[in-house]
C-alpha cells in the first residue's frame, strides 16, 4: 500500500534535471549536460527542443505565462510576464515558446539602477538564460533564471558576477587539488546554506504603523515590560498560528525543490528562523530569494506581516542571513573537512590557510557586501556579530594552526572526552565550539559568515568570498607548480601554510567580539573597524579591489564605479524615506496625540485644588510637545541642507554622522511620551502589541 505524504509533490514545480532527462530526446539532454559542464555550447536546435519540452511541462502544471527572472541592482528580483498564447496567421490562438524566447529576453532597462553604465535614454537591456539554475513555476508563471546586461554587455545585475566568481574559484580550487595529488577531481563548486531569520507581526497592527509599512522597521517605540530577557521564546513551542503559517511555507518551498530542513523560534519574541540544506552557491542564492518572497506572501494569507529588516525593533535581536560557505569536489569531497588527522592533512591546511589570508586581505569588501543601511542598527549587539571582521576557528583547530605556525606541530592533539550520558556509548562531538559574537566562524567543515543582513541578497557576499579565495588558492598553486615529487610538494605546502599563518594570524580571534577590549585589540592588530555601511562602500573602488576583480574578470573598473554610485545612492534614498516617514508620523500622529492629552487636562487645572499629579503631567506633556516639535524642526532643516550635497557618498556620510543621531533624538522624545501616554488616547500599536500578537 502506498502512503501519500506532503513530500510526494516535492520538486513538482521545478524543471529539474530529472524532468529534463524524462522529457528530452537523449541527444538534446546530452548536449545540455555538456553545456552545463562547459564542454560545449548550446546551439539553437537544442534550445528549441528544450523550450518546447519546458513549455509543455509548464502548461501541464498550470502555467499561463513565462518570465525571465533576474536580479537587478536593487533589493529585489524582477520579472516581466509574457503569455504563451499568441495569434496564428488565421487569428486563432497558438501556444508558442521558442528557443530564442528561452535564451534571450529584452526588458526595458531604463528604470533600473545602472550607476552611469548607460544613459537614461538608452533603454535596452538583455536577459540571458542561466541554464545552471533550474526553471520553476511560481504563481502560475514559468520563471527562467537569467542574467541581466546592458546593450554594450556591462553587468546590470548580481547574478552575472556571481557566475563568473563561481567559475574562478572552481578553476583555482581544482588546480590546487590536482597539484596536491588528486588528479581525479575535474571541478570544485562552492556550496552554500543560507539561514533566514525574520519577524512575524499581526497584519492589522502592521497596517497601523506607517514606519513599518514604509521602512520595514520601527522608527519609534519603547520596549514592553516583557522583552527577550527571560529567553523563553528561543527554541520554545511554536505558536499554533505561526505553525500553520510555517506548514504552508514548507509545502510551497518543497514544491519548488527547496530542502527546508529546520525551523524554530528565534531569541526575540515574534522572531523565527528557517534553514535549508546546503546546495550549489548559485542555486542556493536563487532559492533564498524565493524563500523571502514566499515568506512575505504566505504571511499575508495568515494575517501576518513578515519583517525581513535587519533591526525591526530597537533593543531586541536583529535578523541575519547566516551564509554557510564551503568548497566541494565533483566526487563529493568537502575541502574544508579536517579528516581524522588534520595536522597531517595538507589539503585541509592549504585551503584553510588560503581562506584565512583571503579574509585578512579583504575585510573591507566583506563588511560592505554583508550590509545595508538597516544592518548598521544590528551589528555589534544582541547576538549579532561586530563590524570588525575576524575569524573564529574553535580551540582545536586554532591550536593546531598556531602550533603549525610556530613549527611545533602536535600530530596527536586530542579532544576532551565527554562523559557518557543516559547510557550512550557513542556521543558524536564537533571539533569546534560556536562563537556567536564572531562574524566568520569555522563550524566543522564550512565557514559561517554571520554578518550578512536578513533582507540582503547573498549574491554579492558570495561573489567576494569566491573571488578572494580563488586569488589566494592560485597564489598557493603558483608556488607549488613545477615541483616534481609529491612529497616535495607537501613539504613546500607546509612551509607556505606556516608563512601565511605567521603573516595573517591577526585575523584569528576566539574571544568576545562585543567587548570594548576587542575593539582596542583589533586596533592594535591593524584590523579595520568600519562602523557604518556607507563608509565601507569605497572599498569597491579601492585599487586592490579593482586589481582583484579585473584580474578575474568579475567586474570591470567601470562596473565597480557604477556599483559604488548605486550603493551610495541607495543608502541615501533609504535614509530619506526614513526621515520623511518619521517627520510625517511626528506631525500627523504624535504631536496631535500629545495636544489631545493636554486638552483633557486643561479643565482639571481650573479646579480649586489641582492634584499634583495633574500639574506634573501637564508640565511633562507640554515639555514633550515643545521639545519634540523643536527636535523635528531641527531634523527637517538639517536634512534639507544634507540633500544639497551633490556627491551621494558624502551625503551618505553626513546622513550617518549628523542625520541619524538627530532621528534618534526625535525617537527618544516620542518614546518618552509613549511610556506615559494615556491608553485611551494613544492608539498606535506598542511593542508589546506587535511582539505578542501571534499566539
Image (cartoon, helix red, strand yellow):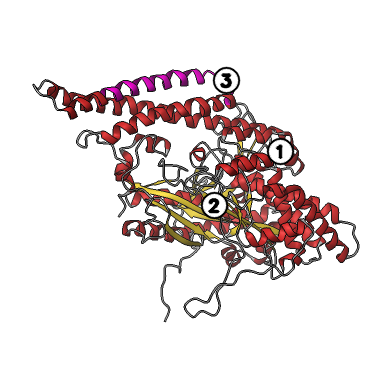
Instruction: Tell me the distance, in whole angstroms, between the alpha carbons under discs 1 and 3.
Output: 25 Å
Q: Is residue 151 left or right of residue 135?
A: right
Q: Residue 322 bears which disc, if any?
A: 2
Residue 207 position in % (x across, y down): 32, 39
Tell me the residue that label 1 is attached to: 545
Q: How busy is the neighbourhood of tag 2: few (under 14 within 10 Å), some, or many (20 plus)?
A: many
Task: Identify which residue, 106 or 538, lies in the foreground.
Answer: 538
Label located before the other in sequence (1 or 2): 2
Is any atom of residue 35 visible in this view? yes
Instruction: Tell me the distance, in whole angstroms, between the alpha carbons under discs 1 and 2.
Output: 24 Å
Write the start and end of the magenta stretch as one range: 621-648
Q: Residue at x 47, y 21 (%)?
A: 639
Q: Residue at x 33, y 52 (%)?
A: 302
Instruction: Tell me the distance, in whole angstroms, between the alpha carbons under discs 3 and 2.
Output: 36 Å
Q: Specify the quadrant that holds the C terminus.
A: bottom left
Q: Quadrant of residue 485?
A: bottom right
Q: Nearer the viewer, mark 3 or mark 2?
A: 2
Task: Identify which residue, 602 or 239, lies in the foreground.
Answer: 602
In the depicted structure, whether residue 684 falls above or below residue 246: above
Label located before the other in sequence (3 or 2): 2
Q: Is residue 584 left or right of residue 103?
A: left
Task: Identify which residue, 619 or 243, lies in the foreground.
Answer: 619
Residue at disc 3, secondary structure: loop
Tell me the residue that label 3 is attached to: 646
Is any atom of residue 104 visible in this view? no
Label located before the other in sequence (1 or 3): 1
Amino acid at each position: 500500500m502506498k502512503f501519500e505524504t506532503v513530500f510526494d509533490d516535492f520538486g513538482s514545480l521545478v524543471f529539474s534535471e530529472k524532468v529534463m532527462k524524462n522529457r528530452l530526446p537523449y541527444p538534446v539532454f546530452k548536449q545540455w549536460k555538456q553545456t552545463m559542464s562547459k564542454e560545449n555550447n548550446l546551439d539553437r536546435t537544442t534550445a528549441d527542443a528544450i523550450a518546447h519540452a519546458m513549455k509543455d511541462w509548464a502548461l501541464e502544471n498550470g502555467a499561463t505565462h513565462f518570465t525571465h527572472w533576474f536580479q537587478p541592482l536593487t533589493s529585489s528580483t524582477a520579472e516581466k510576464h509574457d503569455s504563451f498564447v499568441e495569434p496564428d496567421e488565421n487569428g486563432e490562438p497558438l501556444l508558442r515558446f521558442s528557443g530564442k524566447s528561452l535564451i534571450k529576453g529584452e526588458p526595458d532597462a531604463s528604470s533600473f539602477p545602472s550607476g552611469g553604465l548607460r544613459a537614461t535614454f538608452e533603454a535596452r537591456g538583455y536577459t540571458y538564460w542561466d541554464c545552471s539554475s533550474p526553471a520553476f513555476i511560481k504563481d502560475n508563471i514559468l520563471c527562467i533564471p537569467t542574467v541581466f546586461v546592458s546593450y554594450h554587455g556591462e553587468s546590470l545585475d548580481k547574478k552575472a558576477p556571481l557566475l563568473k566568481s563561481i567559475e574562478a574559484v572552481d578553476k583555482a580550487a581544482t588546480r590546487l587539488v590536482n597539484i596536491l595529488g588528486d588528479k581525479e577531481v575535474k571541478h570544485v563548486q562552492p556550496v552554500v546554506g543560507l539561514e533566514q531569520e525574520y519577524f512575524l507581526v499581526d497584519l492589522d497592527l502592521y497596517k497601523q504603523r506607517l514606519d513599518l509599512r514604509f521602512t520595514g522597521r520601527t522608527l519609534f517605540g519603547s520596549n514592553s515590560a516583557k522583552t527577550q530577557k527571560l529567553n523563553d521564546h528561543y527554541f520554545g513551542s511554536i505558536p499554533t498560528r505561526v505553525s500553520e503559517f510555517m506548514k504552508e511555507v514548507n509545502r510551497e518551498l518543497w514544491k519548488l525543490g527547496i530542502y527546508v530542513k529546520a525551523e524554530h523560534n528565534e531569541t526575540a519574541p515574534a522572531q523565527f528562523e528557517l534553514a535549508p540544506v546546503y546546495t550549489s552557491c548559485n542555486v542556493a542564492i536563487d532559492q533564498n530569494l524565493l524563500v523571502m518572497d514566499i515568506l512575505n506572501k504566505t504571511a499575508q494569507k495568515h494575517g501576518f506581516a513578515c519583517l525581513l529588516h535587519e533591526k525591526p525593533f530597537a533593543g531586541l535581536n536583529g535578523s541575519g542571513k547566516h551564509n554557510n560557505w564551503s568548497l566541494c569536489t565533483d566526487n563529493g569531497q568537502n575541502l574544508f573537512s579536517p579528516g581524522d588527522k588534520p595536522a597531517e592533512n595538507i589539503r585541509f591546511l592549504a585551503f584553510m590557510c588560503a581562506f584565512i589570508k583571503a579574509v585578512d586581505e579583504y575585510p573591507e569588501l566583506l563588511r560592505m557586501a554583508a550590509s545595508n543601511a538597516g544592518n548598521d542598527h544590528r551589528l555589534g549587539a544582541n547576538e549579532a556579530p561586530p563590524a570588525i571582521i575576524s575569524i573564529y576557528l574553535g580551540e582545536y583547530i586554532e591550536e593546531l594552526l598556531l602550533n603549525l605556525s610556530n613549527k611545533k606541530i602536535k600530530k596527536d592533539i586530542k579532544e576532551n572526552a565527554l562523559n557518557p550520558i543516559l547510557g550512550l556509548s557513542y556521543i558524536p562531538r564537533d571539533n569546534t565550539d560556536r562563537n556567536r559574537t564572531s562574524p566568520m566562524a569555522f563550524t566543522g567543515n564550512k565557514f559561517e559568515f554571520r554578518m550578512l543582513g536578513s533582507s540582503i541578497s547573498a549574491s554579492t557576499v558570495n561573489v567576494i568570498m569566491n573571488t578572494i579565495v580563488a586569488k589566494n588558492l592560485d597564489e598557493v598553486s603558483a608556488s607549488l607548480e613545477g615541483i616534481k615529487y609529491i612529497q616535495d610538494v607537501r613539504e613546500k605546502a607546509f612551509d607556505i601554510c606556516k608563512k601565511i599563518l605567521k603573516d595573517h594570524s591577526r585575523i584569528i580571534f576566539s574571544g568576545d567580539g562585543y567587548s570594548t577590549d576587542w575593539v582596542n585589540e583589533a586596533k592594535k592588530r591593524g584590523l579595520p573597524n568600519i562602523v557604518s555601511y556607507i563608509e565601507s562602500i569605497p572599498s569597491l573602488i579601492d585599487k586592490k579591489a579593482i586589481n582583484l576583480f579585473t584580474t578575474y574578470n568579475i567586474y570591470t573598473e567601470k562596473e565597480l564605479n557604477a556599483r559604488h554610485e548605486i550603493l551610495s545612492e541607495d543608502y541615501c534614498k533609504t535614509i530619506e524615506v526614513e526621515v520623511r516617514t518619521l517627520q510625517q508620523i511626528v506631525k500627523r500622529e504624535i504631536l496631535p496625540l500629545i495636544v489631545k492629552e493636554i486638552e483633557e487636562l486643561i479643565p482639571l487645572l481650573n479646579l480649586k485644588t489641582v492634584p499634583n499629579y495633574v500639574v506634573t503631567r501637564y508640565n511633562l506633556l507640554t515639555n514633550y510637545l515643545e521639545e519634540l516639535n523643536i527636535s523635528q524642526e531641527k531634523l527637517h532643516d538639517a536634512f534639507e541642507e544634507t540633500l544639497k550635497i551633490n556627491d551621494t557618498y558624502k551625503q551618505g556620510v553626513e546622513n550617518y554622522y549628523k542625520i541619524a543621531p538627530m532621528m534618534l533624538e526625535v525617537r527618544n522624545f516620542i518614546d518618552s511620551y509613549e511610556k506615559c501616554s494615556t491608553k485611551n488616547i494613544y492608539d498606535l500599536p506598542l511593542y508589546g502589541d506587535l511582539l505578542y500578537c501571534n499566539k
